[in-house]
Amino acid sequence: MTARVDKIVKTYKSLAQIPALLGAQIQSPNIVNGVWSQRNLETGSIAKFSRTLFINNLQTVESTLPVDVSKEILSRLSESQKLRAVLRESDSKQFLEVWQSNKLVRVVDLAALDVHGNVYADVEFSSFEFSPDETKLLYVAEAKVPKSEPFYKRKKPEEPKDGGDAPKPPTRGEEHLFEQDWGEQLVGKKKSVLVQYDISNDSVEILKGVPDNVCVAQPKYSPDGSYIVGVAYSVEPRKLGLIYCTNRPSTIFQLDFNGAYVELPLPNKSAKSPRFTPDGQRIVWLERATDGPHMACMTLAKTNAPLSKDSEAQAVVGLVKSKVEIANKRTFYGIYNTGFPKRPWASNNQLLINTNQKYTINSYIINIDSGDITELEFADGSQIVLDVKDDLVLALRRNFLVPDSLVIGKLAQIVSGNGAQWTELTPKIEVPELAGSTFRYLDLVASEGEVGDFNAIYLGPSAGDDQKVPLIVWPHGGPHSAFANYFILEAALFLSLGYAIVLVNYRGSIGSGNDSVEFLLGKIGTTDVRDCIQSVEVALKEYPWLNENKLALCGGSHGGFLVAHLSGQYPDKFKSVVARNPVIDVASMSIISDIPDWCYAEAGSVYTQKGQVDNDTLMKMRTVSPIMHAHKVKAPTLLQIGSKDLRVPPHQALDYYHRLKANGIKVKMNLYDDNHPLGSVPNEMDNVINTALWIEEHFESQ
């Protein structure tokens, strides 16, 4: 056993050295800079490093060695490339730096100024933008918390002061006043403010005019620098968890430097990622309705700039219910991304986006005048546009077997198909552990329901002896997300151990039309379970080397919900189960999760806390839950749980653990000091290796 553990650890360490591309930028036709991340097992952290590539005729001729930028929280290069701004953390304090060609020109200890709280660096709220004249820097931070003190506190006698304004006395008795934050992975983020740093004056200012009943996010300067646009989230009647949720009530706002604030009227909508067209005449953004599933098809919308009380939104690409035909007779299933590249514009008002499409992430050009859509085709996995400059396009390519590589191309040649379309700037990384593995897409049709199409992905050997290869069944979480074709360390580890995998994109997954997303509402625990079973049966029939007597289940969040259901509803089919932060009892989750509305929507109801408690809805939530089948489970079960998970709180797994034990089932639970994804490097390593060992132990015992 020790030798086997050592081998798995060695394989994990090898796979953990594979870097992932976080972003890249074209600095000139001859210089590209990329930022990569890599797990550092010795420090238990994610290392970030920067590399500069020197290119000639779109070919890399030289590159620098990696430069560690792990301490940089945010960074931004000005458009002229004469300035670089960095937000850095040291000893739990944040420092704002501005660099000029050959020196550091500004350093600001933001904590010492005591103007605001921490600067936001998350994808939902953050911004780090130079003004068009490059004299100022715009960012989002936590509002300063007013000082409070107990009702009684002995103080030293006050000394008389000569002139000046006396400081505002602390409020008494509000030390423990509750104020909501934005939930899972956004803990402590309660009230966002817009902050502008004046580089020339070395001064920090909170911009005035934003109403108290909104939280601002993703601000951008107008092209002439005279005002700002961004997203305004409503905070009434309550905040609901924001991460992984595109349905939070919000709109597009505009604020000038005299404090004049305007909101675009978008009733019952959620808005994301406003961008100005290059000429500054229009604003584009992504939006969807605020009801229903937490992820769904988005509309690409536009309006004239600047905003006014008479501004109206106009759809560029509408909601796609099933699928539509676009240029070159390609099929398009709608937009599911929540943002754009930092520089998304090509000439002639062409916007470049990336979005899930069935089992891949694809890139597209959208003409915002006509709404025409053209796919930037790539047949061997997922392709994600990272940057656009002077119609040069920088993109990331990846698939399950080949980690990230950087490619560049001229847009005209890419679209026309003439000449060399893309050039690799970084070589593909060979992964010896995956030699002999393949991936294949399975397009499936269910036998019931008004929506029948869904898909799965097979990963594993391309051939083998009959009934020899164990199979891991792995449904995704969400449920409104999807597996796409990109490198996954955990999947690579399973393949290296000789297992095959079926990744299930059941009905309700994104990337296959909005009707498919909404079809699952009110049907969780039934149609998604059936789709998993159908995927397994098709894979067993299609690939005879799979061993139907060696099936394991693995999944997290709603994927954990599904593997718990499958284990209970099909107790003799699966030999072991690993569930990460699984939803076990939707009814009890609705009381304590940061997204109680998820529980109502997935059970087919509308969330409200007004009026009397609806016992029928709570009973429906309980009925669709895996807890109803816990007494039938036979398979040994490993629970991987985050003690700080606000999305699926740990009491869900704890109750399941005790129930399985009471019923005499072999069960083990690892409790990590972590949140929903179990994403810290030490916890991920422990989670992944323990998962592999648990599955292997119970395959061998058969």
Image: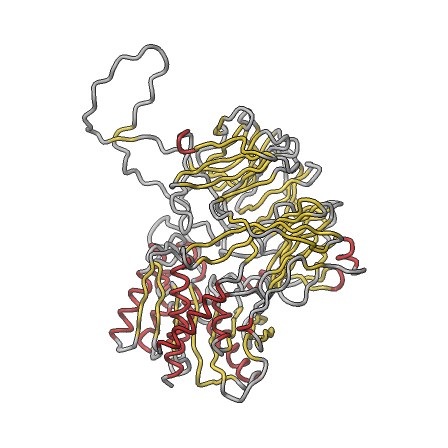
**Horizontal arrangement in the rendering, residue 693 relative to residue 156 (left or right):** right
4 and 441: which is toward the camera: 4
Residue occupying the far bottom of the picture: 466
Residue 130 percent coordinates (x, y): 59, 35
Provide residue 539's location: percent of width, then percent of height.
Answer: 54, 80
Q: Nearer the viewer, residue 185 or 177?
A: 185
Position of 347 with respect to 72 (left or right) is: right
- Identify the colour scheme used: secondary structure
Residue most extreme to the right: 418
| The C terminus sits in image quarter | bottom left
Residue 354 can be seen, yes or no: yes
Q: Is residue 121 left or right of residue 612?
A: right
Q: Is residue 50 or residue 661 the one in the foreground?
A: 50
Residue 620 visible within the image: no
Residue 649 vs 268, above or below: the answer is: below
Q: Position of residue 672 (x, y in %)?
A: 34, 60
Q: How many marks?
A: 0
In terms of depth relative to the viewer, which is nearer, 138 or 355? 138
Residue drawn 73% across the image and 45% down it = 390
Please state the horizontal and vertical placement of residue 344, each as a whole percent of the image: 66, 47
The picture quadrant where one finds residue 579 is bottom left
Q: Quadrant of the N terminus?
A: bottom left
